[in-house]
Amino acid sequence: MSVDDIARIRLAAPGLCELPVSLQALQLVGHPYRRMWRSEAGRLPQQAGRLWELVPAQGDVPLFLAPETVDDIDEAIDIVQSTPAARIRAEVTAGRATRLSAWVEDLCRGRTQARHDLGVAMRAYHDHVMAPLSPVHTRVVTAELSHRTREIATEGIATMLNSLHPAVRWRAGVLEVAGPVHADIDLGGRGLRVMPSVWPRPGLALEWSQPTLVYPVPYATWLAEASAGYDGAKAALGATRATVLQTLVDEHTTTSLARAVALSPSSASVHASALRRAGLVASRRRGKTVRHSLTPLGLDVVTASRGRALL
């Protein structure tokens, strides 16, 4: 990255470009977006089913389904429906091992009915999945962008880039993003837009008007912000893990924690380890025992949920 590229690094909130990547998040067991969706409704409208024929469960998503910087679903549908058939085919078939369905073949040929069906599917998915979760999603993104802004102000751009995700590294003027494809990319002074997302892994959208690095919002941010509006601890963690979190308001050994939440010691240890990886619990060894307690972030989550039982 040149000096001009670094000078043009900026943070941005995602819009309806989240549609295809949120489809992948819904299929990933344990993802906070999936947990919150299941707690709200957990059922997909039948009309949205066509989207699953286009978006794989993992890997890259067809970028034509992710219109850049669009927040209005009508505008997003218009943009997607006007995508040239050749581009649709290229993006849908890239890296695909399975045969295309008859409907996807029609879409790749530019058939009017197939394009209409895609618009219906997008609207149904937006109205029944994305819109109900939008207040939480907005809080999460706002909190993440605020954190990154403070990080740039106090520690600099390099620290911000290096803390986004283990697969993203800034070294000697080069931004490395681990992925399935190896390529050297010169941004040519266009700069870089950095965008938090529900997508489970980092990725680059180089075809957009400004090259964009998309990275997953940290798990702890999801949990803290979800808890501020409703019982997000239960939604994002599951009932048992949320109970363990609340129980650790008081320090416990693994054995005493297991007794308090009616679990086996091995299960209690697994839950405590998962919460520790999320930054919510600290564990330290004293002699032959391991003692667990809440971190400041874990305490914030529990405090935000007070007045609403975690169970």
Image (spheres, rainbow, N blue to C red):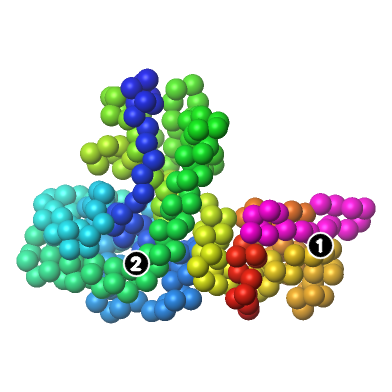
Left or right: residue 264 compared with residue 149: right
Q: Secondary structure at mark 2?
A: helix
Q: Nearer the viewer, residue 228 or 216?
A: 228
Q: Residue furthest right?
A: 287
Q: Indicate the amino acid at tag 2.
A: Met
Q: Earlier in the sequence, mark 1 or mark 2?
A: 2
Would residue 202 be counted in the magenta stretch?
no
Q: Residue furthest front?
A: 307
Q: Is residue 99 left or right of residue 202?
A: left
The local crowd at label 1, few if under 14, some if 14 to 19, many if 20 or more residues have their Cα within 10 Å, is: some
Residue sitting at 17 percent across and 63 percent down?
74
Which label is found at residue 81?
A: none
Residue 38 x %, y %: 46, 75
Q: Indicate the amino acid at tag 1.
A: Glu
Residue shown at the point (83%, 58%) measured from the top left = 291
Q: Which residues are magenta?
A: 284-300
Most extreme residue toward the left is: 112
Camera sees residue 289: yes
**On the rendered image, what quadrant is the N terminus found in?**
top left
Q: Is residue 186 visible?
A: no
The answer to whether residue 40 is above or below residue 192 is below
- Mark 1 highlights which residue? 251
Q: Nearer the viewer, residue 2 or 149?
A: 149
Q: Position of residue 137 (x, y in %)?
A: 42, 60
Occupied quadrant, residue 124: bottom left
Residue at (65, 65) in percent of width and height: 302
In the image: residue 204, left or right of residue 223: left
Judge left or right: residue 110 versus residue 119: left
Q: Quadrant of the C terminus?
A: bottom right
- Kindly identify which residue carries mark 2: 130
Q: Position of residue 202 (x, y in %)?
A: 43, 46
Where residue 125 sits in the image (x, y, percent)?
29, 70
